[in-house]
């Protein structure tokens, strides 16, 4: 019997959309991205074999469309072996309780995310005053209270393996949150970056809506440690991935990916770090 679960008291439907919302994109034969409003959910597994894992769990009030996307790819009645969370912000866990109840699956996340997934501790406040566009200004209305998944969430294995994702390892990529992780498969250079970096300027309402592809650091209004965020981007760039999917924006591959990551590393201050904001070092 599943433990009692509940969302934070401030969870609500958020009016945010992009032109890619509802679209499923096959990036590799065993990696598919579903765009839920303005955030990506990833399905990892070969449809021909049936076994798969879901990475992240989308916006609030989105479980029906997520289930539909899963069943369109893997067949009616399909259920993942597990849900892996890159982190626990509301747009990555917004429908997770309904999905757990539907599928009766275990959730895995980094140990440092556990307080935010067990109802113990709210995330730091988003910063609507940070340098950025309309999405940043809207962040004051975004939920930050912790979801409580009861006994349905476990810490990722300390040895770096990812449950039910053979060949993948998890990489601790903090900065956006303390326990943020990215997932990497060395055999073919596949990276699921979460929000360690993204490929759309997430603070801009217009660019988010049209999904204009451009390399960016983590979303500015929710990132609390920019030095750690920089180190995480440098870590991911150093492994020279061949394919990358992110929590927001479109996939990058090959030379374009490596070029853009090198550009982000070399110009992190200019591209990623806002000139002012609550979490910017030495800001007044």
Image: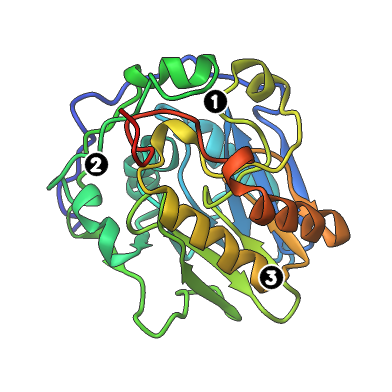
Residue occupied by mark 3: 49
- Residue drawn at x 58%, y 49% as measured from the top left: 197
**Is residue 45 at all visible to an observer of this figure?**
no
Colour scheme shown: rainbow
Is there a contact, CB below 8 Å, between mark 2 and mark 3?
no
Side (left or right) of 259 relative to 221: right
Q: CA distance from mark 2 to mark 1?
A: 24 Å
- The mark lying in front, picked from 2 and 3, is 2
- Quadrant occupied by the N terminus: bottom left
- Quadrant occupied by the C terminus: top left
Q: Position of residue 202 (x, y in %)?
A: 58, 30
**Is residue 200 at all visible to an observer of this figure?**
yes
Per the image, label 1 sits on a secondary structure element best described as loop
Task: Residue 178: name its quadrant.
Answer: bottom left
- Residue drawn at x 78%, y 61% as measured from the top left: 258
Per the image, label 2 sits on a secondary structure element best described as loop
Side (left or right) of 97 relative to 275: left
Q: Is residue 176 above or below residue 262?
A: above
Q: Within 10 angstroms of label 2, few (less than 14), some, or many (20 or more) residues?
A: many
Q: Position of residue 112 (x, y in %)?
A: 27, 61
Task: Residue 224: name its quadrant.
Answer: top left
- Residue drawn at x 60%, y 51% as measured from the top left: 42
Residue occupied by mark 1: 203
Q: Position of residue 27 (x, y in %)?
A: 77, 54
Residue occupied by mark 2: 147
Q: Is residue 221 above or below residue 207?
A: below
From the viewer's side, name the closer residue of 118 and 73. Answer: 118
Q: CA distance from mark 3 to mark 1?
A: 39 Å
Per the image, label 3 sits on a secondary structure element best described as loop
Is there a contact, CB below 8 Å, between mark 3 and mark 1?
no
């Amino acid at each position: 019997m599943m433990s009692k679960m509940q969302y934070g008291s401030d969870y609500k439907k958020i009016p945010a959309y992009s032109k890619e919302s509802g679209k499923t994109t096959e990036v590799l034969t065993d990696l598919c991205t579903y765009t839920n409003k303005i955030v990506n959910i990833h399905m990892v597994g070969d449809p021909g074999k049936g076994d798969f894992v879901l990475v992240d769990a989308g916006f609030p009030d989105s479980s029906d469309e997520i289930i539909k996307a899963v069943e369109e790819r893997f067949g009616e009645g399909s259920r993942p072996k597990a849900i892996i969370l890159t982190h626990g912000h509301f747009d990555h866990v917004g429908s997770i309780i309904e999905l757990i109840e539907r599928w009766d699956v275990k959730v895995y996340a980094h140990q440092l995310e556990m307080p935010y997934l067990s109802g113990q501790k709210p995330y730091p406040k988003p910063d609507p005053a940070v340098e950025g566009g309309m999405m940043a200004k809207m962040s004051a209305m975004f939920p930050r209270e912790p979801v409580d998944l009861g006994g349905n969430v476990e810490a990722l294995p300390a040895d770096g393996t990812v449950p039910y994702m053979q060949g993948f390892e998890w990489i601790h990529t903090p900065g956006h949150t303390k326990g943020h992780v990215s997932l990497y498969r060395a055999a073919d250079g596949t990276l699921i970056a979460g929000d360690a970096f993204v490929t759309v300027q997430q603070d801009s309402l217009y660019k988010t809506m049209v999904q204009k592809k451009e390399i960016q650091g983590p979303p500015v209004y929710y990132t609390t440690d920019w030095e750690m965020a920089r180190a995480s981007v440098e870590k991911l760039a150093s492994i020279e991935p061949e394919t990358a999917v992110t929590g927001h924006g479109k996939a990058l591959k090959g030379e374009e990916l490596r070029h853009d990551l090198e550009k982000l590393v070399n110009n992190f201050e200019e591209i990623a770090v806002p000139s002012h904001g609550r979490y910017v070092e030495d800001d007044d």
